[in-house]
Amino acid sequence: MVSTTTWIIIAAVVVGLFIVYIYNSLIRLRMRVNNAWSQIDVQLKRRYDLIPNLVEAVKGYMKHEKGVLENVTKMRASLVTGSMQEKAKASNQITEALKSIFAVAENYPQLKANENFKHLQEELSGTESKIAYSRQFYNDSVMQYNEGLQVFPKNLFARLFGFTAKEFFETKGKERENVKVSF
């Protein structure tokens, strides 16, 4: 016959294992979110490195659109410093500015034919697609993490262990409007 003490010990072990399982699953979800943000950061760094080359390739052709180039250069600096929200805002602004540069390039047949410019344009276009995918992956990871913090019984332990919700990577206000290019 099994004593009461044995049952108490077994119950304590089961409860302890259950708590460890929940804690570890929350840690895994948080790590997935952190990894997803790192992937966005990698692509933002890639774009950061490509922008000076694009600006140099375009400079000679776009003397009177100097403001667009200066604006892109200023926003580029915001990509490597600041909080996640500041980086998100800078990323969205750069995306719009790059669209402007590519729209302006349509007016310069020699620029469009320039191999260096075409290569940079393809690289940036690919990078923009990777950024979009990385944002989507990040938001999916945030959704799974935040959901884990809200479902029972994980929500009880999440509060106990100090887990907090993460913010989605999103555009706000004017960043959602269509780009209007005028010179």
Image (cartoon, rainbow, N blue to C red):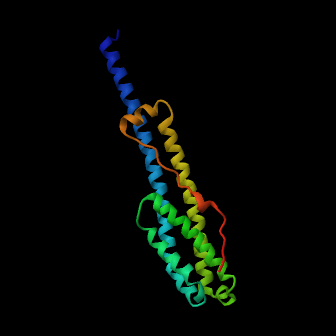
The residue sitting at the left extreme is: 5
For the residue pair 124 and 173, the one nearer the viewer reads as: 173
Residue that appears at 69% across and 88% down: 109
For the residue pair 83 and 35, the one nearer the viewer reads as: 83
121 relative to 174, above or below: below
Q: Is residue 50 visible?
A: no
Residue 169's x, y, as percent? Answer: 53, 55
Residue that appears at 47% across and 65% down: 42
Residue that appears at 60% across and 81% down: 119
Residue 158's x, y, as percent? Answer: 41, 36
Left or right of 107, for residue 6? left
Residue 95's x, y, as percent? Answer: 58, 69
Could you say which quadrant of the image residue 24 lies in? top left
Q: Which corner quadrant holds the N terminus? A: top left
For the residue pair 181 and 3, the one nearer the viewer reads as: 181
Residue 73's x, y, as percent? Answer: 49, 77
12 relative to 133, above or below: above
145 relative to 131, above or below: above
Q: Which corner quadrant holds the C terminus? A: bottom right
Residue that appears at 37% across and 34% down: 160
Q: Is residue 100 visible?
A: yes
Left or right of 80, for residue 141? right
Could you say which quadrant of the image residue 178 lies in? bottom right
Question: Count the marks: how many?
Answer: 0
